[in-house]
Structure formats: C-alpha cells, structure tokens
C-alpha cells in the first residue's frame, strides 16, 4: 500500500510544489502553490476539464442504459444463446485499449467501413471535424465501457428472486412496470457502483483520446489527462503536470465522495 | 499547386495531393521544411523566436496555399496511412510522405502496387531553395552493405540523427527504418533530398519549446480559423512565456 499509493502520491505532491523540468531534475526549485495557480488560470486546462465532464455527463448514463438493456435481453435468452453472445459482447473490454481504439478509428478513416457506408448513404465523405471527433470519442467511450456494466448488471439479474417477478405477473404488472418497480430497485446499488467506477474511469480517459485526436488542437478535444500528459511530458513541466494530476484527483474525490456517502447511508438504512 | 488545379476536376480521384498536416506535430514538421527552404529558422541566437518573422509567415502562407489548392478540409485530416492507402488505391494522385512509405510500396510481400508508383525527391517549397524534406524527419538511415567498415556502420547507427553521418550513409546505400532495403526503389530520391534538403533541427533544447508552441497553433491556419501571422504570433507568445519560465529567455 505504501509503495504503490503513498509514496507516488507524496512524490507527486512534492513535485507539484516545485519548479522542475527534465533538465532540472537534480535542482528543483520550491515555488509553493505557484503551479496550482498556473493550472487554475490556464484556459486550456478548463477547456480540457469541460470536455472531460461532457464525456462523463453523456457516457455514464448512456453506457448504463446500454449495459442494462443488453443484460436484460441476455437474461431472457437460453444458455446456448448466452454462450454465443456474451463472450463477443465482452470483446471491447478484453481487447487492448490502444488496439481497440486504432481499430475503431480505422472504421472512420477514408478506407474504413463506416466511411464507405457514410458516403454511400449520405453521398458525402466522412471528415474528421471538431464535432465528429468529439462524437467519436464519446461513442468509443460508451462502446468500451458498456461490457463492464453488462457483466455487473447481468450478474445482478441472476440474483433477482424469481418469485417476485412471478407474483408481479400474476398481479398484472406489465414488463415496463416490472422493470421500474422490481428490476431497477434490485439493481440500484450496482447501478450506483457502476456509475462511480465509470466516473473515475472517464476522468482518467487518455488512450482513446490520444489516438482519436492525434493531439490535433483543431478538434479542441483534450481531456484532463491528455492535456496533463502534454504539459508534463511534451512541455516538460513536471511540477505543473503534477499539480494538474493532484487537482484531477481532488476533482474525482469531490464528485465521487457524495455518491459514496449517499450509498453508505442507504446501506445503513436498509440494515 | 498547378497540377492540383488540373487534377481536382478528375472524377476518379478524391484528392489531387496530400501531405501530412493531420496533427500539430505533422503541421510543425511541414512548417520546419518550409521555413528552412525559405531561408528562415525557428530561433535567433539569443533564443528569441524567429519563426514568426517574414520567412515563417511566407512558409505558413505557402502551406496554406497548398492545402487550399490540393487538400481541402478532408485532406488536412489524412494521416500517413490514409495518404499511402489513397495513393495505392488510386484515389490520391500524388503525396508527400516519409521515405519508408515509398519503400513499402515496392515491397512485394506487402504491396499490391509494386512498380506502379514512382518516387521523387521532396519538392522545394521555395523554388530554387532547399528541398522540403529533412534528414531528421523522413530518413532514418543506416547502410546495409557488408563492404563498409563495421565501426563506421556502428557510428552511423549511433549517430542516426546527425546530418553529416546520414549523408555519409546515403553515399553507400541507405535503408529506411522499415527494413525493406532490397526493394528500395526510392533510394535515389532519398539521397537527393538528404543532400539538398533542409537538414535537421538545431541541437538547442529551447527548440523543443518552440515546436510545442507551434503544434498548438499552426493547425488553425489549415482550418482558416487564424491567419499565418496570427497563428505564428500566438505561438511566439506561448513560446516566450514558457521559455522565460524555463530560463531560456531573460
């Protein structure tokens, strides 16, 4: 725990309080909170944060809805169909993220399948623009994160007491009513858990954005982590990069902790 | 650009010509070739920015002119692979690309267009000026012949980014870093470009900061969101701020 968490965190905090580049690794200069002030007054940081929040705002509910929908469909199928579909639906989660993103991107490149489909249907060629690239990032995020939600929800559905569903059927409840009053309340804690995990993941989104944007500023699609990388590695401002990483971590806590408290209270009340 | 004017009306192709400006770094590579060809450079001796001077503006303006004449909003998003694929399948008439791509076209193990695509030295952005290709970007080379001194080969490998070493290597038999030396039909074009090209970056750590600032702003010239002068001035301001913080400027 100390080696994996405390030491790196302490080093990041120390770096964030110093002016340090790759050239001055052996001579850091203590500058207090200046790096934090610089990050907070950096327009590109706020732009990156805005896009990160937009990704989370759309992708969190979307991947939960898709994951739940597919889990419900699979729950209705026989074991053979499940065995056929479930492993294939998990592919986005299993494939190496960089490879998956490259394959995803290739679909939209000039010789890609989707680009061909796009030109056949709409009569114009698909072009990477700020809108299309941002949309692809969000689409990819949903595609890549849905399988995990699917697994969690599918596991949760296996724990749903069958007699509850049977009783509601006898009472005349429709499928929609069963979903609303039985299934979703049963999965509620799992939905909150998945939302929390996804929020943290999306805040740390890096590889897909890096590949889909090729770091082209015209797309204005930096996330906090890709901008953090550019500041720390490309511009070689290790202190400022560390300050940004610390602020991102604090941001994650600010968003996640209220959820954790809410979940904890609910668990206590249930007991 | 004159060829593009003719080719853009040809229905069988999507784009007359592409060069890679699909990312900040790609834009900056092109800009480096163009500004050097026009006699300029990134920094003055005191590390103050020179890239936003007249040569830089001329270079960026020329790149924009090529984009407008040949590539359009679609072409500026073409990656290296997009350009190579387009050339191979006949939807792009000609491209400026890495030497290794030229070698790939001639590799019978992977290419379906062996002998169908010809290579030429990089064009000179400034007619009569240096060719718009650099030993640093496009031609990582080591000799493959067994007849040379092994120590010399080793030095060439270890100094692969050194212009003089690369030129020495080019006199023997260059290979690209993509390991297809026996199919290197573009060797003559490579040698010509290395010998008369724009060379490599100055070994000044402040150049990295100039590059980074240019990555952030040059692409906006391609989209028309900024004029060359505006983009270069914005990059210069960003460079000055960072170079001052990092101690390269007073």
Image (cartoon, grey):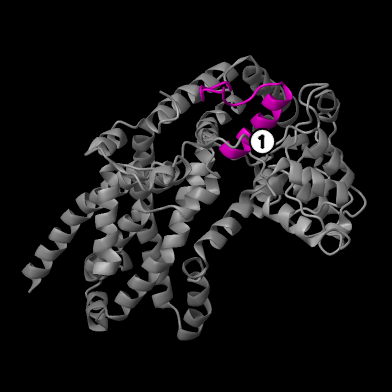
Instruction: Give neighbour class at mark 1: few <14, some 14-19, many 20+ (Cα, 10 Å).
Output: some
- Say if B58 sits above or below A210 in the image: above
- Quadrant assignment, res B74: top right
Viewer can see residue A203: yes
Q: Is residue B248 left or right of residue A269?
A: right
Q: Is residue A228 left or right of residue B110?
A: left
The percent coordinates of residue B14 (x first, y second) are 77, 38
- Say if B196 sits above or below A223 in the image: above
**In the picture, which quadrant includes the C terminus of chain B?**
top left
Q: Nearer the viewer, residue B48 or A91?
A: B48
**In the picture, which quadrant includes the N terminus of chain B?**
top right
User: Is residue B106 covered in magenta?
Assistant: no
Q: Nearer the viewer, residue A73 or B106?
A: B106
Residue picked out by circle 1: B74
The percent coordinates of residue B52 (x first, y second) are 57, 19
Q: Nearer the viewer, residue A187 or A246?
A: A246
Region of the chain picked out in magenta, as a range: B23-51
Identify the chain of the residue marked 1, using the numbered disc in the image: B
- Quadrant assignment, res A5: bottom left
Q: How many marks?
A: 1
Residue plotted at (64% across, 46% down): A118
Q: Residue furthest bottom?
A: A79
Q: Is residue B88 left or right of residue B68?
A: right
Q: Residue furthest top?
A: B54
Residue plotted at (53% across, 73% down): A88
Viewer can see residue B112: no
The percent coordinates of residue B219 (x first, y second) are 57, 31
Q: Secondary structure at mark 1?
A: helix
- Say if A199 sits above or below B87 in the image: below
């Amino acid at each position: 725990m100390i080696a994996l968490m405390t030491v790196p965190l302490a080093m990041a905090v120390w770096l964030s309080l110093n002016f340090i580049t790759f050239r001055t690794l052996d001579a850091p200069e203590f500058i207090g909170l200046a790096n934090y002030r610089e990050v907070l007054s950096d327009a590109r940081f706020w732009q990156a944060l805005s896009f990160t929040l937009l990704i989370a705002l759309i992708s969190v509910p979307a991947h939960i809805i898709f994951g739940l929908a597919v889990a419900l469909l699979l729950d209705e199928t026989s074991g053979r169909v499940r065995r056929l579909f479930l492993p294939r639906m998990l592919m986005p989660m299993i494939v190496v993220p960089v490879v998956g993103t490259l394959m995803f991107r290739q679909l939209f490149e000039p010789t890609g399948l989707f680009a061909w489909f796009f030109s056949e249907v709409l009569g114009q060629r698909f072009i990477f623009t700020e809108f299309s690239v941002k949309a692809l990032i969000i689409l990819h995020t949903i595609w890549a994160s849905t399988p995990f939600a699917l697994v969690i929800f599918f596991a949760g559905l296996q724990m749903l007491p069958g007699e509850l569903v049977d009783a509601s059927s006898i009472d005349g409840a429709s499928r929609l009513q069963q979903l609303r009053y039985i299934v979703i309340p049963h999965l509620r804690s799992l939905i909150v858990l998945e939302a929390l995990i996804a929020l943290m993941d999306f805040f740390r989104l890096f590889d897909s954005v890096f590949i889909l944007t090729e770091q082209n500023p015209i797309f204005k699609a930096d996330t906090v982590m890709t901008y953090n990388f550019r500041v720390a590695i490309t511009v070689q401002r290790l202190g400022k990069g560390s300050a940004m990483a610390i602020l991102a971590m604090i941001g994650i806590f600010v968003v996640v902790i209220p959820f954790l408290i809410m979940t904890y209270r609910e668990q206590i009340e249930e007991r | 650009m004159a060829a593009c004017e003719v080719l853009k009306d040809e229905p069988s192709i999507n784009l007359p010509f592409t060069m890679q400006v699909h990312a900040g770094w790609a834009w900056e590579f092109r800009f480096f070739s163009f500004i050097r060809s026009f006699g300029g450079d990134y920094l003055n001796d005191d590390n103050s920015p020179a890239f936003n001077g007249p040569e830089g503006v001329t270079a960026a303006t020329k790149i924009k002119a090529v984009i407008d004449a040949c590539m359009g909003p679609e072409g500026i998003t073409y990656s290296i692979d997009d350009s190579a694929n387009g050339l191979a399948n006949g939807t792009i008439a000609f491209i400026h690309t890495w030497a290794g791509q030229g070698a790939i076209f001639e590799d019978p193990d992977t290419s379906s267009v062996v002998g169908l695509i010809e290579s030429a030295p990089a064009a000179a952005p400034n007619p009569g000026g240096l060719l718009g290709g650099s030993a640093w970007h496009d031609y990582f080379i080591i000799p493959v012949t067994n007849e040379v001194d092994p120590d010399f080969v080793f030095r060439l490998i270890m100094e692969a980014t050194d212009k003089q070493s690369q030129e020495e290597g080019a006199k023997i038999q260059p290979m690209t870093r993509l390991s297809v030396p026996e199919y290197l039909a573009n060797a003559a074009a490579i040698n010509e470009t290395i010998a008369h090209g724009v060379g490599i970056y100055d070994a000044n750590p402040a150049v990295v900061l100039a590059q980074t600032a240019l990555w952030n702003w040059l692409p906006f010239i391609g989209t028309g969101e900024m004029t060359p002068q505006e983009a270069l001035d914005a990059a210069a301001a960003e460079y000055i701020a960072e170079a001052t913080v990092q101690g390269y400027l007073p």
